[in-house]
Structure formats: structure tokens, C-alpha cells
Amino acid sequence: MEYMPEFTVARPSSLAELVAARRANPGAHLLAGGTDLVANIRRGIVAPEHLIELTHVAELQGIAETSSGGLRIGAGVTLAALIEDERVEATFPVVVEAAHAVAAASHREVATLGGNLCLDTRCVYYNQSEWWRAANDYCLKHRGKICHVAPKGDHCFAAFSGDLAPALMVLGATVEIASADGKTRRCALPDIYTDDGLAHLRLTADDCLLAIDLTPPEPGLRTGYAKARVRGAIDFPLAGVAVALRRCGADLAELRVALTGTNSCPLLIEGTRDLVGAPLDADTLERLVGLLPKQIQPMSSTFTPPGYRRKVIANLTRTLTSRMFDEAA
Amino acid sequence: MAKEILQLTVNGQPREDAVAGNLLLIDYLREVVGLTGTKMGCDGGECGACTVLVDGRPRLSCLTLAASSAGRQVETIEGCARGGRMSHLQQAFHEKLGSQCGYCTPGMIMAAEGLVRRTPAPTQAQIRQALGGNICRCTGYVKIIESVEAAAAESAA
């Protein structure tokens, strides 16, 4: 690790103060739990002149029941708080499951839902020390001119590695975003992402994720999350899959599948609607797995080769979907 | 770099120090307060050696700005012993051989301390979960888990 660069830290306690702090400090980085950002600062990947700590912004905190019977979860809610909330566990267990899969208990004490959704993309050529990256002439994502994963291209393939996004996507979550003028807007969670390792968030530099809204799940919906990683207790995903499905008698009535770790953004898999209305037999499972190759693009951005991750994501998708279908009986 | 006044409690003692905004909690504890029991391991939030308690909950001090702990209760390994007697966890790590080179031990004990305060009789699965972010490169983990189990049993007795 490197020295800590010099920076100022603002600590607003309300959304209005946050907006004012951003106006006063253009280009400031938002600091939530810091489990990713502080490590990146220490590696010299990020060199902020100003930080704005979000811990005390009241509007980002709390889990509240909505009038529709769903939940509004503040972006600043820690993963530990999310896991311990009985309402989340009872209504959206896949969110708790995915939160549990993030890093280790001590990280989850401070890591936030918003931080996990806005996590920077990761790559073995990027998340390294300054001297390591300098010796490799840096990379396209930071200070360099070529992507070592795909040297002939001009695209960054750093992978999105958050665990919460796929779980929330299969639940149809929407997000609330505060702009620099303090106004808020809503959009579907997938709409804040784009498949570009250099800039995977469609949020502007002045936007701040405020909260995540979940509507009540359809009766009978079964959900689950499965993750492959090198070190079971702590690692980012090599691949992660979330599944939400309903069955009607022997038939599949609804199916949503979302992935993480395969692309520069989380993916809600397209084409799953074509599989409903029939039993989830071996043929249907293979048709499901057959949807993946054209939509995923694992590259050599992790310590495991892309071919391995392709097999892993197919197996995780197949086994988790099958298990959810059986449990829904 | 401009400094600001940091007020917090370290091992029960109120403190007031002028610290730079970019000072990490681990550097504050080791260099300013002089409590060198908290260890820097991986230096990047991956090994758990620097674990301390902030308001009773485990925290990686190498990823925490000191100023972010303003007004909070910080506890380190030096705060575990009472009246010259080791805590149950420290005693158990000693007797059950949960510590070999000892470098990871302060982080292990603080992470375990955070667990047993909330869950006085943890299952082995809960212990493994709570210590999942703490790496030991010499003892292996069986003796460490046995140490936490023994300490919890001793506390319950």
C-alpha cells in the first residue's frame, strides 16, 4: 500500500448539506463505508482532493415500509444492518443472502448497500499497488494506454463485482437518485449501469444514490443467490447468479435471472420469458443456460480464466434455478 | 495539511488529539496513542489483523479514517485485560494454542470479542462466520476456533 494523499473531508448531516458540499467541492468523491474506496486511494488508483463522508446524511439511512407493502432501503444502510433486519429477511431473503456473500463480517459492518451497487469495476491489472501497475506500464482504466486483458482493443473489461445488484434486479428494484440541485428521480436498477469498465455507472458526477425501493414480491416467488469465489470467506465474485421464479403446478410461471462478475455491469438475462409455461425439465434448463453465452463476456480480468468462469456461471445458473423450482413445489 | 480536533474514547479513556483528515485509525492508534498491539497485516482490508472495536462492533482500522471515529468508543487489544488479568478470550488463546507467531492474534481476539458480546454462546458456524475475514498464516484455524469456544464456555460458567 501507498501513502495517503492529502484531501479534505466534509461530513454533511442532511441531503441539503450534501448538495451544498458537492457544490463547494466539485469532483469530490463520496465516501460511505470506505471498504473499496479507501483501499483504492491507498493503491493510488483514486486520488481525491475532496471526500464527502455520507455516514451522517439522515436521508440515506433507515429501512422503512412503503404504502404498497414493500420496503425503502436507504443507500447508506450497512450490509450488517440489512442482514439483521427481520423485515428484509422475511420478505426479500435473497437480499440478505447476497449481502451475506459480500466480503467478511467486519467489512459488512461499514460497507453499505449504495456502495455495493456503485462499486468500482475490478481487474487484476487495476487493483494492484502503484509499483505493480507502474512496472506494467499501467492500464487503460488508469493512466495507461492499453488494456492488458484485450491489448488490441480500446475497451476496458474490468468486471462489476457487487453481489447485491443481481439480487435486487430479479426483485425488480427501483432506485432513487438525488441530483446536484437536490431534486430526486427514480429509475429501474438496471438503468443505472452500462457495460463499460471505464464508466459503468450512468450516474453523473453530481448524482447520489439515495435509496432502493422494493415492491412486495409476487405470491409464491422463490429467490436465491449463488456465488463462486476463490476464498470462500471474503472474496469478490468470480461469478454470481440470482434467480427469482414462480411455478404453477408442474410448470414454470415466471423466471428472472441476473448475473454479476461476468461483465462490466450486472446483467438481467434476456429471454427467460420464453421459457415459462412449461415444466423446468432438462431441455428447458439447457435452453436457459443457452441464453448466457451471447450475453456474458467474462475476460481475463480475474485470476481464473474466462472459460472456467463461463462453465461456473452456467453450472450455478442451472443448479440454482433447478433448486428454486423444486423448492417452489 | 490542516488538522482537526478528534474527540473519542480509546479503551475507556477520553482523548482529544489534533489529527490530519487523511490519518487512518490504525496509524492514529499506533503512532499517536502509542497502542501498537493493533497490527498492520495486508494493509488493504483483506486480512483482519488490524481489527478493533468501534462502539462494540468489529472494524478494520486500516480502512477507517481516524476522524470518522469521532465521538465513538474505540477498543483495542490493550483494553481487553482487566486488573492485570487477561480476558477469557486472551486466556483461552494462550491455553488452547490459538496463537503461534501472534501477529494476527489481536485482530482475531477483537473480532471474536465483537462476536461474543452480541452472541455469548456462539455456534461453531457463527465463530467461523465472525472470523471469516481474519487470516492466520501459521496455526491454522482449528485451534483458534477452539479457543473462542473455550472462552465462551468459560464466560458462561
Image (cartoon, coloured by chain):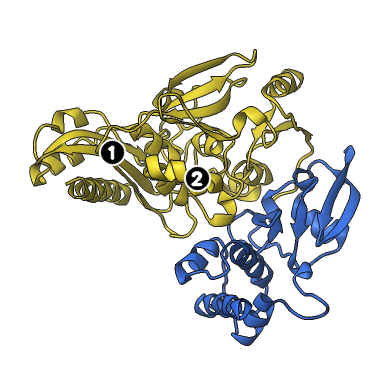
Chain colours: A yellow, B blue
Q: Which residue is mark 2?
A: A85
Instruction: Specify whether A187 is left or right of B108.
Output: left
Q: Which residue is mark 1?
A: A244
Q: Secondary structure at mark 2?
A: loop
At 70% from the left and 35% from the top, the residue drawn is: A56
Name the front one of labels 2 and 1. Answer: 2
x then y, percent, for residue A201: 49, 26
Does residue B64 sit above or below B119 in this rendering?
A: above
Q: What is the C-alpha distance between the residues marked 2 and 1?
A: 21 Å
x then y, percent, for residue A258: 32, 36
Observer able to see residue A203: no
Instruction: Specify whether A183 is left or right of B78.
Output: left
Say which of A57 and A145 sits in front: A57
Say which of A5 and B88 sits in front: B88
Marks 2, 1 in one chain: yes
Q: How many marks?
A: 2
Instruction: Tell me the kind of residue under disc 2.
Output: Asp
Instruction: Tell me the kind of residue under disc 1.
Output: Ala
Q: Secondary structure at mark 1?
A: strand
Does residue A48 sit above or below B87 in this rendering?
A: above
Q: Which image quarter holds the C terminus of chain B?
A: bottom right
Circle 2 Cα neighbour tier, 10 Å, few/some/many (<14 / 14–19 / ≥20): few
**Subunit ID for the residue under disc 1:** A
At 79% from the left and 75% from the top, the residue drawn is: B82
Q: Which image quarter holds the N terminus of chain B?
A: top right
At 51% from the left and 49% from the top, the residue drawn is: A84
Toward which corner of the image does residue B54 lie, by quadrant?
A: bottom right
Determine the residue located farthest toward the bottom in the rendered image. B95
